[in-house]
Image (cartoon, rainbow, N blue to C red):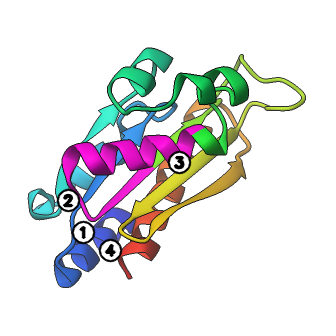
Amino acid sequence: MTVAEKLVALLKAQGLTCATAESCTGGGVGSAITAVPGSSAVFAGGIISYANEVKRDVLGVAAQALDEYGAVSPQVASQMAEGVRRLLKTDLAVSLTGIAGPDGGSDEKPVGLVWFGLATKDGVRTEKAIFRGDRAKVREQAITHALGMLTIGAA
């Protein structure tokens, strides 16, 4: 059983719904969830907020957070998760914002850095991960991590 299959089964058993706000994974988390038969009972949808304008104008991320901390930050990941949970009226929401590479990294924010947000009725928590490998590997690992966060949130 895949992580996505476990997630969908758990969400169904708990009577919960989820949504995604994705940047560096470009919809990969939503794709993984919707690959599972019956996922329509638990997955409301997702927002691919690759551009900062979408983070700000659609998800409600504060322009100040984007300017002060940058798109790849716990502040932005938190606001992305809250925004999509509010917009799609779900029990849980996960967000991802990161640098998949091969370019765009810095000493402070290296290629492979991804910030995650998990929004629930109890608030939002963030997690940071630095993944190794090429662009595809970073994205693959980030998708798996996000699915795992949703699974923990649903448990």
Q: Which residues are magenta?
A: 76-94
Tag 3 residue: 78
Residue 31, picture quadrant: top left
Return the x and y of residue 93 as percentages of the image width and height: 36, 55
> As shown in the figure, which amino acid type bears the numbered disc 1?
Val
Q: Which of pointers 3 and 4 lies earlier in the amino acid sequence?
A: 4
> As shown in the figure, which amino acid type bears the numbered disc 2?
Val
Which quadrant, please, contains the N terminus?
bottom left
Which quadrant, please, contains the C terminus?
bottom left
> As shown in the figure, which amino acid type bears the numbered disc 3?
Ser
Return the x and y of residue 121 as percentages of the image width and height: 35, 68
Tag 2 residue: 36
Give the dominant element type of the magenta stretch: helix, strand or loop.
helix
Residue at 67 percent across and 26 percent down: it is: 70
Residue 13 visible somewhere in the drawing: yes
Secondary structure found at label 2:
loop
Residue at 42 percent across and 71 percent down: it is: 122
Q: CA distance from mark 1 to mark 3?
A: 23 Å
Q: CA distance from mark 1 to mark 2?
A: 7 Å
Contact? badges 1 and 4 (CB < 8 Å): yes
| Mark in front: 3 vs 2 | 3
Secondary structure found at label 1:
helix
Q: Is residue 51 magenta?
A: no
Badge number at residue 8? 1
